């Protein structure tokens, strides 16, 4: 339950920051990236940062999903190997000398 409350508070703060950027970020800003410059309102910097953070979060989520899928594939291969070994052992027992005479 406390995690839900923390998530709700963080969501409220994020919404308030977005509202503040929309309505209070009209001051002109100049950003120098060396090879190119950006001029625009301060809210542009805020939303560019939000976009960067969103891309970062999505890439981390994709890495986590890929790692989970890889772990699941490894577990499946391990399980198939174990079952294959059991089947081979069963077939060796079944084809023993006492079974071939019947």
Image (cartoon, rainbow, N blue to C red):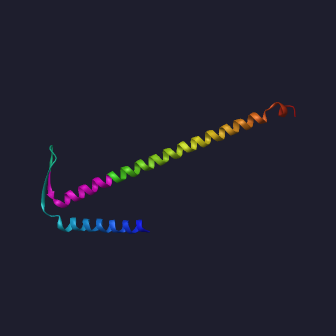
81 vs 72, left or right, is: right
Identify the residue at image location x=70%, y=39%: 87
Q: Which residues are magenta?
A: 38-55
Q: Is residue 94 above or below residue 72?
A: above
Which residue: 29% across, 67% down?
Answer: 13
Quadrant in the picture for the N terminus: bottom left
Is residue 57 or residue 39 the one in the foreground? 57
The mark total stands at 0
Judge whether residue 39 is colored magenta: yes
Position of residue 57 relative to residue 96, above or below, is below
Residue 44 vs 90, above or below: the answer is below
Q: On the rendered structure, is 71 left or right of 93?
A: left
Which residue is located at x 36 percent, y 68 percent? 8
How far from the left and from the top, in percent, is residue 23? 19, 68
Residue 67 at what x, y percent from top left? Answer: 45, 46
Residue 86 on the magenta span: no
- Looking at the image, the residue that sits furthest to the right is 102
Q: In the picture shown, does residue 55 fall above or below 27?
A: above
Q: Residue at 49% across / 47% down in the picture?
A: 69
**Magenta part mainly helix, strand or loop?**
helix
Q: Percent from the top left, x then y, of residue 15? A: 29, 67
Horizontal placement of 13 versus 38: left or right?
right
Position in image of residue 99 (x %, y %): 83, 34
Q: Quadrant of residue 10?
A: bottom left
Indicate the quadrant containing the C terminus: top left, top right, bottom left or bottom right: top right
């Amino acid at each position: 339950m406390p995690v839900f409350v923390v998530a709700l508070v963080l969501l409220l703060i994020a919404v308030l920051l977005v509202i503040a950027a929309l309505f209070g970020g009209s001051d002109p800003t100049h950003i120098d990236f060396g090879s190119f410059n950006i001029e625009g309102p301060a809210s542009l910097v805020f939303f560019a940062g939000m976009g960067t953070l969103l891309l970062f979060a999505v890439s981390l989520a994709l890495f986590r999903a890929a790692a989970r899928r890889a772990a699941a594939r490894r577990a499946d291969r391990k399980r198939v190997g174990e079952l294959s070994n059991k089947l081979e052992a069963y077939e060796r027992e079944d084809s023993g000398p006492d079974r071939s005479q019947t």
